[in-house]
Structure formats: structure tokens, C-alpha cells
């Protein structure tokens, strides 16, 4: 089983190896507990096989390394364990927990005998902490929670309606393999992950003072996944609930949540005007299991939101840059672009059961007068892949296993 898991996460190892030898700091980023530490250990095990390599490995979540608190401590540890006669691999897990770590990284990364691979669970360390010190000399590799295919292998499940339902409900945190898919155990683990991310990567990192509001805010975002919202609309809602908070504070809190990778902000894009709007965005969760935990209840009442969240994450996994499409006549759930100039338009739906639903989902796509491919992705029974006047109707399962092919 361990070997199979290693194979499935091999694509991240391949990405790391692709950037070795280029005088670059390699950073695995993503929410805590999505598998960064495991990937770093896989890489450590691989380079350890070569006797000409010297491995300097630090995991800040382990008791053995708790004394490494500042960049001076990190420098001292590296210098003590460095071997000038070998290739030195400096591997640091959750490096943002080391004060001023970027000073240490900067002092080693251009040494000819050094490769640096680190992990971090806060995007702010890239945008400010690290980039100010080393400029563009780093490569970010974004690690996501499990894909549907990985989920099946991790839990030894065959592709089926029931398995897809479990993936939609429980999400893709790799650590669930230790608990199985028992509802109570899974929720307990997910709550532990949520509390850890909230405390370490949001509250402590951003020095959040109004913690009760932060918790209310993230539950609001869970309940409104995939809806266009703004700081002003949240402020009005909170006021109706008896809590007064400024739009500026809400923006800061949402940024802190996004920096932790727990949620992702998706901008709106004017399809005809070809420009990004500056306000009113959508928010999706890195893991739909945590989203479901926060929203509560069963999925019958919010299945469309969860499906949209699952589709968004898989589009990112496929390498797309995703925005929300805005038309005069309505909205396109996802406008998906790649650096090679390719584009796709996607509508997410649960079941296309009647003509009004079909017109809503397919009609907006038909109104886009360019030649880029257009898709509706749904769980409509018996639909695998079909064509509707130039719009492809894909089943969610097909999309999760085969992409947009």
C-alpha cells in the first residue's frame, strides 16, 4: 500500500527533480495535512540512496527540532551537519515556524554544493517574507489534497457511485487513511486539522484578535461556497446577526484565510470586455471534507455547492488558472486558462433534469461567441459524454478520471 501511495504522489517528486540544479529554492506549498511532509520524506528517501549526498532534514512539527526557533538556530544546525565533500540537501518541513527563516535560506541557496527544498503552509511567506530576500529565485510547487483517483487507491475503493459519494462527502485529506471513512472518526480528524490550520496559520500568523468572528466568517464562507460575495455583503449580514464589523477588517480576515490555503479566492472575469472585476468574488475550500464539516448537515441540500468546489480543485490540479465568467445575460462558473493560450468554459450542475435547467446551464455557454471548448459537468444519470450543439456534457466521474478529454 505504501508503495502505491508513493507512486501516486510521484508527480510531485518529478516536479522537484525538474528544478534541481538550477540555483532555485524549491518550495512545497499548500494547506497543512494535504501531504507536503510525506512528499518531502519521499524525496529525502530517494536522494538518501546516493552515498554522495548528505541529507540535512528538519521537521518543525517534531519534538526533536523544537529548539530550532530562529534563523540563527537554523544556520547553526545546517553548519553542524553540512558535509563539504558531498552534495548537501537542506530539507525543512513547515519552515515558516522558524523566525526570519528567509535570512538563512538566502545565505545557502546559491552555494554550489547545496540544494534547498522546503515546505510551508502560508502563502504570505512567499509574497513577502521570502521574495523580498531572494527575488524570483524560488519555484513554488502547490500540493493539493487527494484527487478522486488517489482517494480510491488510498482507501482501496473501486470506482462507483458510492465511492464518488464518499469522495464528495469526506474530501481528500490523506490522513483519513488512518481513520477510515467512518463518519464520526473522519469528522474528528477533520476538526483537528481545521483547528490546527486556524490556530497556527491564521490566528497566530496574522495576529487575529476577534477569533469568534473569524470562526463565524469561515462558516459563512462554507455555507456560501461558490456564491459571489463581497466584504460589504458580509458586513451587512453580520450586522443583521447583531455583530458590527468593518469591511476592511473582513477583507483582512479573508486574506488571512486565503494565505493559509484553506480557502481560495476566485476573481470574476468579464468575458466580452476581457477584464477582471475588482470586487465581488467566489470562494472555494481546499478540501471539500472540511467545507462540509463547517457547513454541517448532509449533502442533499447543498450538493451543487460541493460539486462546484470539487470541480474547481480538479481544474487547478489540471493546471488551469481559473476565474468566474461574467456575461450580461448571466454567469459562467469557470473560465479556465493555461499559459499556452488554451481556454475552456465550464458550467457545474448537479442533475440536468428538465428543460429550464438545461437552458440555464447550456444557454449561457451557447451565448459565448468564440471557438474555445465549452462544457457542462454534472452527475446526471447515464450521461458519460455527449454533445449539445457544440457544448460537451461530461459526467463528474469522467471529468475527475479523464479531465476535459
Image (cartoon, rainbow, N blue to C red):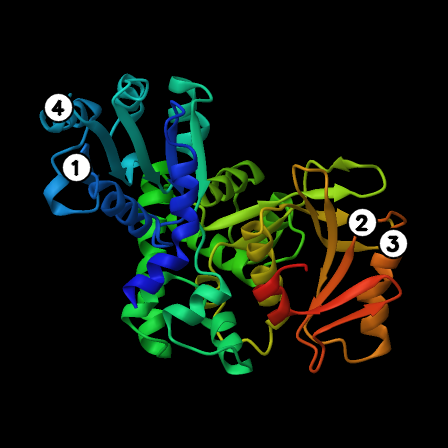
Residue designated by label 3: 329
- Looking at the image, residue 194 sits to the left or right of residue 320; the answer is left
* Alpha carbon separation for disc pair 4 and 3: 62 Å
Q: Say which quadrant the C terminus sits in.
A: bottom right
Compared with 396, 162 (above or below) is below
Labels 4 and 2: the sequence-earlier one: 4
Q: Earlier in the sequence, mark 1 or mark 2?
A: 1
Q: Is residue 30 visible?
A: no
SS for callout 4: helix
* Residue named by callout 2: 372
| Picture disc at residue 170 | none
Q: Residue at x 87, y 54 (%)?
A: 329
Q: Are marks 1 and 2 in contact (CB under 8 Å)?
A: no
The reply to whether callout 4 and callout 2 are in contact (CB within 8 Å) is no
Among numbered discs 4 and 3, the one appearing first in the sequence:
4
Q: Is residue 337 above or below residue 392?
A: above
Alpha carbons under labels 1 and 3: distance apart = 64 Å
**CA–CA distance between discs 4 and 1?**
24 Å
Residue appearing at x 37%, y 73% in the figure: 155
Which mark sits nearer the N-terminus, 3 or 2? 3
Residue labelled with disc 4: 76
For residue 59, side relative to residue 311 (left or right) = left
Amino acid at each position: 500500500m505504501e508503495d502505491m501511495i508513493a507512486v501516486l504522489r510521484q508527480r510531485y517528486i518529478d516536479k522537484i527533480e525538474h528544478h534541481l540544479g538550477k540555483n532555485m529554492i524549491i518550495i512545497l506549498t499548500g494547506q497543512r495535512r494535504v501531504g507536503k511532509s510525506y512528499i518531502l520524506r519521499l524525496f529525502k528517501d530517494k536522494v538518501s540512496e546516493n552515498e554522495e549526498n548528505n541529507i540535512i532534514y528538519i521537521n518543525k512539527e517534531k519534538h526533536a527540532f523544537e529548539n530550532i526557533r530562529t534563523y540563527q538556530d537554523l544556520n547553526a544546525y545546517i553548519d553542524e551537519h553540512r558535509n563539504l565533500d558531498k552534495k548537501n540537501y537542506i530539507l525543512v518541513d513547515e519552515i515558516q515556524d522558524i523566525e526570519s527563516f528567509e535570512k538563512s535560506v538566502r545565505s545557502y541557496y546559491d552555494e554550489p554544493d547545496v540544494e534547498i527544498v522546503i515546505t510551508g503552509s502560508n502563502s504570505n511567506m512567499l509574497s513577502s517574507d521570502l521574495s523580498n530576500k531572494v527575488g524570483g529565485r524560488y519555484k513554488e510547487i502547490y500540493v493539493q489534497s487527494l484527487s478522486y483517483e488517489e482517494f480510491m487507491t488510498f482507501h482501496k475503493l473501486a470506482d462507483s457511485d458510492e465511492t464518488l459519494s464518499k469522495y464528495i462527502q469526506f474530501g481528500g485529506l490523506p490522513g483519513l487513511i488512518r481513520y477510515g471513512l467512518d463518519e464520526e472518526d473522519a469528522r474528528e480528524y477533520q476538526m483537528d486539522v481545521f483547528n490546527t490550520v486556524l490556530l497556527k496559520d491564521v490566528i497566530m500568523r496574522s495576529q487575529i484578535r476577534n477569533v469568534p468572528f473569524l470562526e463565524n466568517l469561515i462558516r459563512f464562507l462554507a455555507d456560501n461556497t461558490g456564491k459571489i460575495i463581497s466584504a460589504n455583503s458580509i458586513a451587512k449580514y453580520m450586522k443583521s446577526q447583531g455583530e458590527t464589523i468593518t469591511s476592511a477588517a473582513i477583507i483582512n480576515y479573508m486574506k488571512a484565510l486565503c494565505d493559509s490555503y484553506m480557502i481560495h479566492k476566485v476573481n470574476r472575469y468579464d468575458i466580452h470586455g476581457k477584464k477582471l472585476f475588482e470586487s465581488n468574488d467566489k470562494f472555494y475550500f481546499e478540501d471539500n471534507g472540511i467545507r462540509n464539516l463547517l457547513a454541517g448537515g448532509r449533502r442533499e441540500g447543498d450538493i451543487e455547492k460541493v460539486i462546484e468546489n470539487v470541480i474547481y480543485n480538479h481544474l487547478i490540479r489540471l493546471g488551469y488558472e481559473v476565474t468566474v465568467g461574467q456575461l450580461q445575460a448571466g454567469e459562467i462558473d469557470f473560465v479556465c486558462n493555461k499559459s499556452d493560450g488554451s481556454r475552456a468554459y465550464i458550467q457545474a450542475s448537479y442533475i440536468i433534469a428538465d428543460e429550464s435547467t438545461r437552458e440555464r446551464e447550456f444557454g449561457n455557454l451557447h451565448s459565448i461567441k468564440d471557438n474555445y471548448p465549452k462544457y457542462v459537468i454534472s452527475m446526471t444519470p447515464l450521461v458519460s459524454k455527449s454533445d449539445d450543439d457544440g457544448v460537451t456534457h461530461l459526467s463528474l466521474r469522467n471529468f475527475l478520471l479523464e479531465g476535459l478529454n
